[in-house]
Image: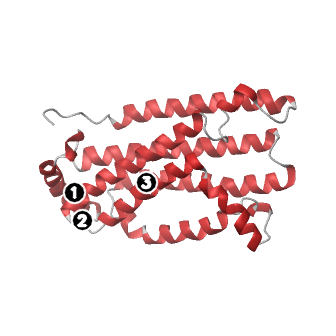
Amino acid sequence: MKSDIPLPRPGKLSAILGAGVFALAILGGASVWLHFGRGRTGDMGLGSFFYLEYEANLPSWYSAMLLLASGLLLLAIARVKWVAGDRFRRHWFGLGVLFVVFSADDISRAHEFTIAPIRSVLPVDGIFHYAWVIPALPFVFVVGILYIPFLFRLPPRTKALFIVAGGLYVGAALGFELLTGAYAAQHGESNLGYATLVSIEEALEMVALVILIHACLDYLQKQLGIVGIRWLKASSVKEAGGRAEQAGTEGGT
């Protein structure tokens, strides 16, 4: 690679991605109101292309893209950390893999296939109407406990952004899922109330991902000094690895 391809500035990219989330939220909200707000049920027609709850439409692909971008940025940081021999290199790698898997799941909705088997074993409803949250809750708890030392070794700015992004994402993905489950169990899914709740849930998840992307880019550029795609070159990774060791030391003070 003879010339470097610069990484986008965190603030500029966040503004662009955030504008995309805002536009999708407006379009999705309008489609929900024009359909359910008028007392209609069933097929949403063209509005289904913008409804944030549906799969294989514009919002679902945008959300999957944000998840994949987050995963790839985390894996980029993990590569530098691995060369540096950083004690938390596996944590960065684990997060990266996790978000790449989340991206695939966001497109396939694979987690929803666990609902029926779980219900066959545990006759739950109400807040556990979407029963996939039952194994998800302890999984998130365990991951959270395991990542506490990692989180508190991050530089203050990165730590704050990760806490906001993580809290918002988990709160939307699980907290709102419990709320919408309870609502759906009583009122069903083909109504304005349900559509509003799930639209807010999906929009908040995307906002959290924009914050995470901002945090990763900011860390790459300001903490590791990587301003371009040169981390693909082994020599540059080693150079950045030295800065990664310093960043890890500074983050722990």
Residue at the spot x=21%, y=46% of the render? 231
Q: Is residue 26 above or below residue 105?
A: above
Where residue 95 appears, as percent x and y from the top left, is: 41, 59
> At numbered mark 2, what does the secondary structure look like: helix, strand or loop?
loop
Which residue bears the numbered disc 3? 162
Number of residues whose C-alpha sits closer than 10 Å to that of mark 2, classed few (under 14), some (14–19) or many (20 or more): many
Q: Quadrant of the rendered structure where residue 16 is? A: top left
If you read the primary sequence from the N terminus, does the residue marked by circle 2 or circle 3 appear first?
A: 2
Mark 2 in CB contact with mark 3 (< 8 angstroms): no
If you read the primary sequence from the N terminus, does the residue marked by circle 2 or circle 1 appear first?
A: 2
Label of residue 244 in the image:
1
If you read the primary sequence from the N terminus, does the residue marked by circle 1 or circle 3 appear first?
A: 3
Mark 1 in CB contact with mark 3 (< 8 angstroms): no
Amino acid type at image mark 2: Asp
Task: Please indicate whether residue 175 sits to the left or right of residue 87 in the image.
Answer: right
Number of residues whose C-alpha sits closer than 10 Å to that of mark 3, classed few (under 14), some (14–19) or many (20 or more): many
Q: Quadrant of the rendered structure where residue 23 is? A: top right
Closer mark to the observer between disc 2 and disc 3: 2
Residue at the spot x=45%, y=44% of the render? 211
Mark 2 in CB contact with mark 1 (< 8 angstroms): yes
Residue at the spot x=80%, y=52% of the render? 183
Task: Please indicate whether residue 205 sits to the left or right of residue 149 in the image.
Answer: right
Task: Please indicate whether residue 1 sits to the left or right of residue 9 in the image.
Answer: left
Amino acid type at image mark 1: Ala
Amino acid type at image mark 3: Phe
